[in-house]
Image (spheres, helix red, strand yellow):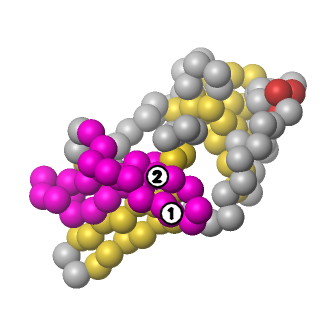
Amino acid sequence: MNTVGNFATFIDEQGHAYEINHRIKKAIFVERQELPHLRKLQGFTGSETVNGLNCSVRPVLVNGKPGGKEYRHRPYGLMIRTEWGLGDSLTVRELYDVKVAEPDQSLLRIPEGYSIDPNPEQ
């Protein structure tokens, strides 16, 4: 679960993502969306070590042209690094000090007393 302020993101066992609003105690289903300018190419092209983790690498298209890479730690599907360029700028997102551990299963649920909004506003 990723928490920022009154909001958290939660993904259940089926892979459904919810935005949890702690202020109103609701879990709202979130549809997955890709950024329109950023698309991943099919297939990994190699592997590299990033921050001590063996990652598979695949190219990324930016506005239809090769423009970046994605580095994914395959055993957990964790994106360790992404990099892409638009114009003269390069954007890099990277995770550091990643520790793999098995969380307590009781933590992997929508909190008690919260309701799931069946008709989220889009």
Q: Is residue 88 left or right of 14 when viewed as pictured?
A: left
Q: Which amino acid does label 2 sit on?
A: Cys
Q: In which quarter of the image is the C terminus?
A: top left
Camera-side residue of 35 and 78: 78
Residue at the farthest left position: 65
Residue 15 is inside the magenta segment: no
Q: Distance between the residues labelled 2 and 1?
A: 7 Å
Q: Relative to 68, does residue 20 appear above or below in the rendering?
A: above
Which residue occupies 68% across, 30% down? Answer: 27
Q: How crowded is mark 2: few (under 14 residues within 10 Å), some or many (20 or more)?
A: many
Which residue occupies 75% across, 23% down? Answer: 115
Residue 51 is inside the magenta segment: yes
Residue at disc 1, secondary structure:
strand
Is residue 22 visible in the rendered image? The answer is: yes
Q: Is residue 84 left or right of 62 when viewed as pictured?
A: right
The secondary structure that dominates the magenta segment is: strand
In this picture, which residue range is highlighted in magenta? 43-72
Mark number displayed over residue 55: 2
Q: Which amino acid does label 1 sit on?
A: Val
Residue at the farthest bottom position: 88
x and y, in percent, of residue 64 in the image: 13, 53
x and y, in percent, of residue 70 in the image: 37, 54
x and y, in percent, of residue 86 in the image: 23, 70
Q: Earlier in the sequence, mark 2 or mark 1?
A: 1
Camera-side residue of 4 and 120: 4
Residue highlighted by disc 1: 50
